[in-house]
Amino acid sequence: MTALTKAPSELAPAAAAPVSAALIGQPIPRLEDAAILTGQARYTDDLPIKPGTLHAAILRSPHAHAEILGIDVQAARAMKGVAAVVTGEDAKRFAAPFLVGVRAPMEHWCLAVDRVRYPGEPVAVVLADDRYLAEDALDRIEVRYRPLPVVMSIDQALSGDGEPLHPAVGSNIVNTRPFGYGDVNAAFEAAEHRISTTVQYPRNSCTPMECFVVMADYDQADGAYEVLSNFSGPFAIHPVMAKALKVPGSKLRLKLPPNSGGSFGNKQAVFPYIVIMGVCARVAGRPVKWVEDRLEHLMAATSATARRTDLEAAVSGDGRILGLRMEQTDDVGAYLRAPEPASLYRNHGNLTGAYRIPALDVVNRLAVTNKTPTGLNRGFGGGQLYFAIERLMHRIAVTLGLDPLDVIRRNLVPAAEMPYTTASGGILDSGDFLAAVEAATTDGGLDELKARRDKARAEGRLYGIGYAAIVEPSISNMGYITTVLTADERRKAGPKNGAQASATVSVDPTGGVTVTVASAPQGQGHRTVLSQVVAEVFGLRLGDIAVNTEFDTAKDAWSIAAGNYSSRFAGAVAGTAHIAATRLRDKLAKLAASQLNVTPEDIRFAGGRVFAAGNPDNSLSFSRVAAAGHWSPGTLADGTEAALRETAFWTPPPLKAPTEADIINSSACYGFVFDICAVEIDPVTAQVRIDKYVTMHDAGRILNPLMVEGQILGAFAHAVGTALYEEYAYGSDGRFLSGTFADYLVPTACEVPVPVMLHRESPSPFTPLGAKGVGEGNSMSTPVCIANAVADALGMDISTLPLTPARIAALIEKPEVARPASLDAAPPKAPAIAGGRGLQGEGTRTVPASPEQVWAILLDPKELAALLPGCDALDLAGPNAYRAEVVVGIGPVRARYLAEVELTDLDPPRALTLSGRGSSALGFGEGSGHVTLEATADGTRVVYRYDAAVGGKVAAVGGRMLDSATRMLIGQFFDRLIARAGGPAAVETSPSLLTRLLRLLGLRP
Amino acid sequence: MPSLNAQTKHPVTITLNDGTRTGHASPRMLLSDFLRHELGAHGTKVGCEHGVCGACTIRLDGVAARACLTLAVQADGRRVDTVEGLAPDGRMTTLQDAFNRHHALQCGFCTAGILMSLSDYLERVPKPTETELRDMLSGHLCRCTGYAGIVRAVMDVTGQASGNADAKDASGRKEPGHV
Amino acid sequence: MKPAPFDYLRAASAEEALAALAEHGDEARILAGGQSLMPMLNMRLLQPRIIVDVSAIAELGKIDARDGHLAVGASVTQSGLMASSDLATRSPLLAGALPWVGHFQTRNRGTVCGSVAHADPSAEIPLCLVALEGEVVLRSARRRRTVVAETFFIGPLTTLRKPDEMIEAVRFRLPKPGAGHAFREVAMRHGDFAITACAAVVDADRIRLAVGGVGDRPVARNWPILKGDALDDALNAFAWELGGDDDQHATARYRRDLVRRVGRLVIEEARSCQA
Ligand SMILES: Cc1cc2nc3c(=O)[nH]c(=O)nc-3n(C[C@@H](O)[C@H](O)[C@H](O)COP(=O)(O)OP(=O)(O)OC[C@H]3O[C@@H](n4cnc5c(N)ncnc54)[C@H](O)[C@@H]3O)c2cc1C
Ligand code: FES
Ligand code: FES
């Protein structure tokens, strides 16, 4: 156990003697904060733009799946302030489809060509003098679509029915890869029990507070693109972008800003927009700028993969797992977008988690669906993996009547076996997992929690405790994704492995030190930690180090692994900076040695001075030594190189390419996380309250405890969202429903408790400073730990997230108290599954006219026009088919729809089907209603049943009210019909009838 | 007063952190855009433009409000305070200092808005309980910090927690907000 | 996400605002606190020709307890009402419910009347207005009329207000001596619109329960003093009448269960705080 935070007084370097206190490992508050706290820090959207810059707005598909029949941009192009409108045609001229990570004929263009495959897919871009004008013009672009059937779930993709998204592939399962490690069949034969589970992990995302920003320019003469964007890496995507823009990498200069408003992996997904804006700049011949808005981000930026996992374990009598069969299917959205299938393969070396499971069979599948393409997202792949594994551990315990903690203990990799090689090839580098678990249970107060649980249960309350034990991979092997290829395909493609990090350290003529790294900080305290590391090497103060966090592919050292993702910073990047600084220091030592007449080995750096180890008075100031290389290179001793600048590249030694047998060490190091969670569930509301959360981390050597705890707290908050609130929801008709922060529920200060954080430090033997990643662990461990606690509280299985009150209520609720017979009639039928269908309903009204009269009204275009909301006239388009402009409004919300209306299945005067579809700037709507007419004493009983679908903006931001709004619009249609048929007077003579009718429609109490 | 025409840009003069600034805005221009792009006061951030995230929070005539839900023309003749005005002489306020000490920010995109809310709120409620404070903070989304450092920083400056409250006790002693 | 163009009028008086409404009718939109209107404008869900800003009309900024009612003018913010003197005694229900309306920052600008005009089916203020048998004072350039809250709301975001009318004030009934009030809401997160919200007013011989978030507007029921199974039966019938819809956050069934359970809780709570 380490005491993480020391009092500030202990940090003060002693002033007199040239001794520097160690900086690495100290809880030093961040150096970057002052600029942010005073509003001076510059983020991408704050940076100056080039004169003449055009502002882009993107037209997006309201459909989940549709053929594009035509795009008319004339009206938009003619608008004041509009310079250009760019479409898929331009993409075809100036760009190429993105490279795809598997061998399957799928084309993904930056702007839709011929088809759209997810709601929000970019279709066209308007470039105008400002963003307001650009959005005005968006409303004027007309796109004609032919909707296609949608694929909205993994199970639907697996079932094989449904329209293939990519016809040339022929299936929506675009890749299937079986793997075998060890003798799984033998394990199953030997085992006393077989225990299985199936879980579904939802789509969600870390939604950084800053959205994407791209500024792009094209140099006609050089044929080169220059882009400034808050891209986060991995720079393996740089070649993907360059290829899509059809230029060599040297002609795509990418610059990163000094500050970025969070990424959590998500900013990787700005890359298609970099390509789009490159094309736009080229078409317009002017610089362009695009700032993603929140609606665009939530709808179409990126998402974690949804995953279905089927597990079957061979288990011994005492709960040991002898072998495991695993099937994982990732929903990657409409396109397999780089760096996917990263989410599915990132954990390939640690598929068995923190456990010693000798035999493993795996089948990995990639499913495409009509949803946003997926990508990196804090803990990517880990939340999905451990949701399955740790639910299984809990289930094993429940099935065998064991304590879940004992099942975890019995299966953990023993300390004596470190470094331990997993069945699939991961090398768990260090740690004593069991000791960490024991420390966590003691220091985390597990006994007290158990006592609380006993007491609560005795009182009939729902209280539960859950656990999760995981390994947290960091520093991804660039070769892991190639595990998706067969050994044969890999041989053809050439080996891929390693994880190059780079750092440059330089000294200037005044002795100032500058550090540049190929990373893209988004708040992790790079400046502070790099200053600590480099200042310590040179014996300088923190303030003597300048860390330049901007980045420029044309000038700075980088390689494909560069970027800020997969927890590379502490382990790889800071370590590489240490290597570069140490090399530069050794050169400076040589310079100083000749001046101080000692050997370089005897030179020490501390307190801003360079001195002889045995005789500190024999010294020079650091700046003097540093200046020598600049001011007097001629006086350097022969063979001595000036010490001006060092660039180091480093790749973790254990990262090899996958073997013929698909053995892969997918990450350089693996931290350990063990969590305990206690929850109580409110019996009235079914809401989950986290009573206590304990999280134990062993992330190797800790470079700055404040940053480490900041990372843990941040990942924990994300995980609380994943577990209880967040989900990208879609209707089964394809409409996207989580378009605002009022619908996509990011937890606030009221929802996120503070966990108890515990630490151990088992340095990694594989990283320069012994540090491992720490920022993703809780994104992996916490969702399932909370789920296990809820399962324990309910005594039930949990197989999906988020655990919303309605979901929990559905698990525990008894059959509903019956509808009292005294109520007149059932209200319009409520659908069965939340979000799981189009808008449906039915109703009955009585119209004071004969069926023949009603029929005549419905078939007369003039009359029909008067019934439709906001419709002036219907233009005949065919037999009983019309075209019209209708204005549909709910309260203040208004949209002008170009609509087609049709009457079919005519059975006069008894029945017909009225259908319509229309599109507007707010999206599309379509629906059909089957209407039957029946003569009664009061006139005609009209019974209708409708099925409607709404897509685009209205659905994304108004999901909460879609049903009632649809019902109201349909109600208005029949109100008008009643008025038309009998006149309002006729209705008013029987107020009780009206009241009853309105009540039937839910329009009146 | 006649109405302002949609198609024209109108002069808008505000008192921005003690100085008078004039820019031009069409009626539909959001105050957040006006501050950032017309006046170059980039400290105020934009995270959602629909009022939920709180990144754009400023003080309008002293009252914490969403700049993204305010029209620039509405602010004409009024006082607007932004993060740039909190430490006018370059010396950070005790609250800003506490944010630094307690690691209450990471990417910092939410920070300006939170500071502006707090500067209004703490004038009205000088010593909030942790529950009250969290209730107020629910008007801001922070994706990085889990809010822990923010809460600690405020409890610290309001004299409700010891100066080294971030020295968390590994044994799980109950700190403010600990569960 | 930027609004479409519109003209803008900062009205200095109610007359000026009403004249603009009379001139532009449905093409005009009143802007009060902007906490609902501005997001909709930013998303271009509506594109009015002119925005009539009433937030600076001083004469509409009054809070008065008169004629058995607490009258709240059109430019009174939610924070303003919360901070007004004696709210806890003048309207214990509002005092209990207002902290649930959005957040500190949105209440600073959002108005009481704006929330009523907006008529979100889950909103707390319309619910309280219905629970307290309040009234909406509508004024146009030509006339003033008062509509009972219960009939004012007719659907999601839809009310009886005519395009040329402004809500001049809303009037909440002051508590009867001896009445007990209680409010509770279940939302996904703190400050979210309610999945279900319940407001109860109980006096010597009547239980009144109003529910928001389940139907397409706030709905109230009156019962004699029921207890035990009889109360459960009444709540069950009410829950079924409200029906409720599924959405991405909750099922209709869950909403009905909340009516049964939370409805009962608020009634018991209101009863227990009867003077
Ligand atoms: C993050 C966030 C969370 C929120 N959470 C909640 C919540 O939990 N519960 C809740 O109830 N609300 C919530 N709201 C909305 C609430 O804050 C609004 O204040 C309220 O709905 C509208 O009031 P307003 O004064 O802002 O009106 P505006 O937004 O200005 O106007 C709303 C509508 O009413 C009309 N209008 C306004 N005033 C008048 C008038 N006097 N006469 C006629 N028409 C008028 C406008 O034309 C417009 O159509 C939230 C808002 C945000 C941004
Ligand atoms: S940008 Fe204004 S609240 Fe999010
Ligand atoms: S510090 Fe990044 S969002 Fe709060």
Image: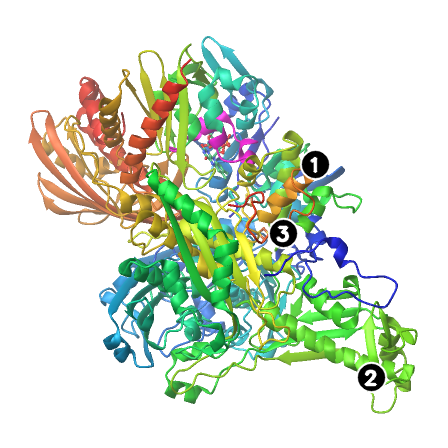
Q: Amino acid at mark 2?
A: Pro
On screen, A830 above or below A332?
above
Quadrant of the image for the N terminus of chain A?
Answer: bottom right
Q: Mark 1 — on which chain does it sit?
A: B
The dot on residue C116 is none
Which mark is nearer the camera, 2 or 3? 2
Q: Hey, which quadrant is residue A971 in on the image?
A: top left
Q: Residues within 10 Å of mark 3 (few under 14, many from 20)?
A: many
Q: Amino acid at mark 3?
A: Leu
Work out whether residue A149 can be spotted.
Answer: no
Which mark is nearer the camera, 2 or 1? 2
Q: Is mark 3 within 8 Å of ligand 3?
A: yes
Q: Which residue corresponds to the image point at 67% horizontal and 57% vertical from the top-left? A: A47
Q: Which residue is mark 3?
A: B105
Q: Position of residue A425 (x, y in %)?
A: 43, 80
Magenta region includes residue A243: no
Q: Which residue corresponds to the image point at 69% horizontal and 74% vertical from the top-left? A: A578
Is A241 left or right of C247, judged from the image as shown?
right
Mark 3: secondary structure: loop
Q: Are marks 2 and 3 on the same chain?
A: no
Mark 1: secondary structure: strand
Q: Which residue is mark 1?
A: B14
Residue A429 vs residue A802, the one in the foreground: A429
Quadrant of the image for the C terminus of chain A?
Answer: top left
Q: Which residue is mark 2?
A: A600
Is A232 left or right of A374, judged from the image as shown?
right
Q: Residues within 10 Å of mark 1 (few under 14, many from 20)?
A: many
Q: Position of residue A498 (x, y in %)?
A: 53, 80
Q: CA distance from mark 2 to mark 1?
A: 63 Å
